[in-house]
Amino acid sequence: MAEYSILVVEDEHTLRRLLEYRLGKLYTVRTAANGEEALEKIAEELPQLIISDIMMPKMDGFALQTALQERKDTRAIPFIFLTAKADEASRLKGLRTGVDDYITKPFDLDQLLSRVERLLDRTKMFQTQLDARIGKDFSRKLMPKRLPDVAGYRTLFYNSPRDHGGGDIFDWTEFRPGSYFITIGDVMGKGLQAKFYAFSFLGYIRSTLHTMMHTTNSPAELMKRVNQALMGDATLDDTFASLLLLRWEPAKNMITYANAGHCRPVLTGPRGSEILTHSDIILGLDQNAQFKDTSLVLNPGSGIVAYTDGILEQRMKSGEQLGEEGIIETVESAYGSAEPVERMIDSVLDDSETREFGDDVLIFWLQRLAVREHREPRWFSPFTDVSEGA
Amino acid sequence: MQATAMNFFVEPVTHDTAVIRIGKALDFRNAAEFKTTAQDQVHAGVRNFILDFTDTGILDSTGLGSVFSLYRQVSPLSGQVVFASVSRPVQVVVQLTRTYKVFRQFPTVDAARDAIR
């Protein structure tokens, strides 16, 4: 499928056919015999580039170009004028706002093709840069600025979004005193669109948590609501997301989770690591989907490692993807080190096909400390008066 | 009558059932083409889709999303989407997303054809 569509505006039949034929090998080409026809074609669908003659009956090239300049959606379409060599005045007049190039007739077709290619490349480059900038902004807003800080626990987070990555989400909230909700998910798709949907989707989750706060604290119940909301919303039509909802109650050392088709987290500890196997169907497919809560107690030193598919699908030297077995091994080898998440990243990259990640990577590590954290004691010096109001 | 559409080979079974052969990959690069191919079939009256994953080494989330879209489109029309000859990489994704509850699987295209007919 041709990536770009070009509109050729030329009243001379033979030249129009020639351009249509040559450009048609590389692009989708539509044609018009004058400015009026061109505007009709543009109204049907915006082309990515316009090549126009100047002297034409009904509406000439200048009038067409002026009309396009007046409209916001057509102003930025790259525009090439074909001018007759004899008509020097037109050529100069042609060098005006909104005209990106002019080509003098009779012209060399290869030269025209290379200029078209250059213009389209440049437009694409601007678009890519803009997308990357907006994408980065979304990624930043989708990730937390800080993590929960709870005595006796350690929380670590790693995220490296890529320009063409997908819609990873991570969020947490202390939804009742001493009870935290942690959200990890992935909205299917790639690029800006996925990021945009991820952003809206996160809004859904937050509002569902907020609304249901007084009714339930069950991740499965919340999951069901989020799924129904997702499926009932026309703007989020065709949005599918995997989601892991964790309720964490540090005082009880309890974790309760529901998993909707998301990468299955790892339970790790001094006795080894294993996958937390229970999961249900991904969100957005089945209106009546049911979800189940699973609870577990975190013993001293044990923790949960949750992640998204970027790391799971990383291509390794073996030619295979890292996979769940690979994840378990990686967690196992990182357990006990001072910076386990960094250790995980390093060991995965060391064994990767190329030493970089092919997709967004997100890891959340939550661990109960083996020994209760030693907090700095308060010192009361007999020589300094530290009493209230001093 | 047989028709090829871009990368995807479509083989009609009955007036409302067709096999789409997914090639080596269904991912962010060709998911849009898959959608167009499937869309044309739906417009032509096809309701049941057999997806042949024999050669498929890559199925990413965008690709899977396009299959999900098809499912959401045909299921209200009493249609179905089934998977045939599922390769290992595809099986991994299906397991992960727990979608085997939605997409019936058959060992071969012929088995799927017999079951659906």
Image (cartoon, coloured by chain):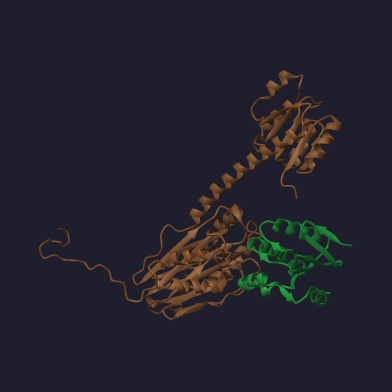
Judge whether residue A215 can be spotted in this image. Answer: no
How many numbered marks appear? 0
- Check the image and name the residue furthest to the left: A383
Residue B93, percent across and down? 64, 70
Judge whether residue A352 can be spotted in this image. Answer: yes
The brown one among the chains is A
For residue A204, which quarter of the picture?
bottom right
Residue A147, percent across and down? 41, 62
Identify the residue at image location x=69%, y=28%: A66
Residue B101, percent across and down? 67, 75
- Check the image and name the residue furthest to the bottom: A271
- Check the image and name the residue furthest to the right: B1
A164 over A74 or under it: above or below: below
Q: Quadrant of the C terminus of chain A?
A: bottom left
**Foreground residue, A88 or A151?**
A88
- In the rendering, what colour is chain B? green
Residue A193, percent across and down? 61, 54
A248 over A128 or under it: above or below: below
